[in-house]
């Protein structure tokens, strides 16, 4: 095992060297090493935001359910 100083991160492990998934959207070109990361990223290119905060007075909307769940965990809605 390698020892790295606290300020330096160890090199990132690539799950399948030589295999990557590139976003095909024009002017994006982000590269992912796991297919499900690309699939999740593709949602960022859609216009709709189907996930809405259920709290009264909050108009927050999200493209992904996981972002709504994070919002509900982190935001303290004032009542």
Image: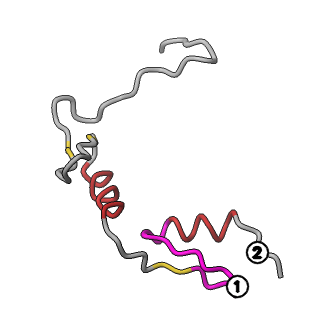
Left or right position of 63 against 22: right
Residue 71 on image: x %, y %: 62, 67
Q: Bounds of the magenta span?
A: 53-66
Res. 33 image quadrant: top left
Q: Which is in the foreground here, disc 1 or disc 2? A: 1
Q: Main secondary structure of the magenta part?
A: loop
Left or right position of 49 against 47: right
Q: Secondary structure at mark 2?
A: loop
Q: Quadrant of the C terminus?
A: bottom right
Within 10 angstroms of label 2, few (less than 14), some, or many (20 or more) residues?
few
28 and 14: which one is in front? 28
Q: Residue at x 82, y 76 (%)?
A: 78
Q: Residue at x 58, y 75 (%)?
A: 60
In this view, which residue lies farthest toward the front? 27
Tag 1–tag 2 contact (CB < 8 Å): yes
Residue 44 on image: x %, y %: 36, 60
> In this picture, is 39 found above or below 13?
below
Q: Secondary structure at mark 1?
A: loop
- Residue 67 magenta-highlighted: no
Q: Specify the label residue 37 is tagged with.
A: none
Left or right position of 76 against 52: right
Residue to which mark 2 is pinned? 77
Q: Residue at x 48, y 20 (%)?
A: 10
> In this picture, is 79 found above or below 36?
below
In this view, which residue lies farthest toward the bottom? 56
Residue to which mark 1 is pinned? 57
Q: Earlier in the sequence, mark 1 or mark 2?
A: 1
């Amino acid at each position: 095992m390698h020892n790295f100083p606290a300020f330096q991160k160890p090199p990132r492990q690539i799950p399948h060297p030589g295999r990557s998934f590139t976003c095909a959207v024009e002017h994006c070109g982000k590269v992912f090493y796991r297919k499900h990361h690309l699939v999740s990223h593709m949602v960022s290119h859609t216009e709709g935001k189907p996930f809405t905060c259920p709290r009264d007075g909050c108009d927050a909307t999200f493209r992904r359910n996981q972002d709504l769940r994070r919002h509900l965990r982190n935001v303290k809605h004032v009542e």
